Image: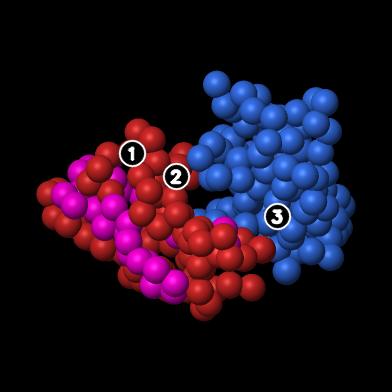
Amino acid sequence: QVQLRESGPVLVQASETLSLTCTVSGFSLTNFGVIWVRQPPGKGLEWMGIIWRNGNTDYNSALKSRLSINRDTSKSQVFLKMNSLQTDDTAIYYCTRDLGDYWGQGVMVTVSS
Amino acid sequence: DVVLTQTPPTLSATIGQSVSISCRSSQSLLDSDGDTYLNWLLQRPGQSPQLLIYSVSNLESGVPNRFSGSGSETDFTLKISGVEAEDLGLYYCMQATHAPFTFGSGTKLEIK
């Protein structure tokens, strides 16, 4: 059964770094990529970036300078790190398989000033 | 980056009514492999998004066949033939042809 689960801190201070983990099961990270998507409260979906099955990455142009996505295939985990957080980074952060067919439940991250 | 323009932003429908949502791309979504990676997703209130349609017109497993997708190149449409109460929520188109991928701004479907 395919599952994705996001984990990480729910409250982060402004100017600090956000670290989130997406733990997957039911598929291999060497066969599928994983995408990070976020959604500020009351707003639409924003595509953040992808780590492809070969380990390459692509990022949202607006976030590229402060975002990195990595993985540990042996642990079936994908990691998101984003620095220099601001209050408008407050959002639900989701990970999803690259086909968009399976999504995690999301984690609500609040950036406090 | 590819810009997806979704219209209308809000849609109000009665049960049984058929509705359509448009998604227009700033550039062709036809990939060099011959496929067109335009997907439609539904986000019900308080839930994660779910995939409805992939590659323009392919119905995701388990999705009712009242949902259908059509289009090509830069113009795409999601149609719901006979809206049901469970269809309320936010609909998004998403392109996965050109990295970085992008979402449309969303269409909120309300039930009258």
Q: Which residue lies furthest to the bottom in this view?
A: B26
Tell me: A5 left or right of A14. Answer: left
Q: Are marks 3 and 2 in contact (CB under 8 Å)?
A: no
Residue B111, x across and y down, in percent: 22, 52
Residue A67 image position (x, y, % from top left): 81, 56
Q: Given contact means CB atoms under 8 Å apart, are the residues at marks 2 and 1 in contact?
A: yes
Quadrant hosting residue B101: bottom right
Residue B23 versus residue B94 in the image, above or below: below
Residue found 12% across the figure and 49% down from its top: B16
Residue depicted at 80% across the width and 25% down the height: A75
Visual hue assigned to chain A: blue
Comes first in the chain, label 2 or label 1: 2
Q: Marks 3/2: CA distance?
A: 18 Å
Which residue in the protein does label 2 denote? Answer: B51
Instruction: From the image, tell me which residue sits under label 3.
Output: A49
Label 1: which residue? B63
Few, some or many C-alpha atoms within 10 Å of disc 1 (few <14, some 14-19, many ≥20)?
few
Name the image quarter holding the C terminus of chain A. bottom right
Give the letter of the chain under mark 2: B
Is residue B4 or residue B43 the one in the foreground? B4
Chain to which mark 3 belongs? A
Disc 2 marks a residue whose amino acid type is Leu
Q: Which amino acid does label 1 sit on?
A: Val
In the image, what residue occupies the spot 45% across and 54% down?
Answer: B55
Marks 2 & 1 on one chain: yes
> What is chain B's hue in the picture?
red
What chain does mark 1 sit on? B
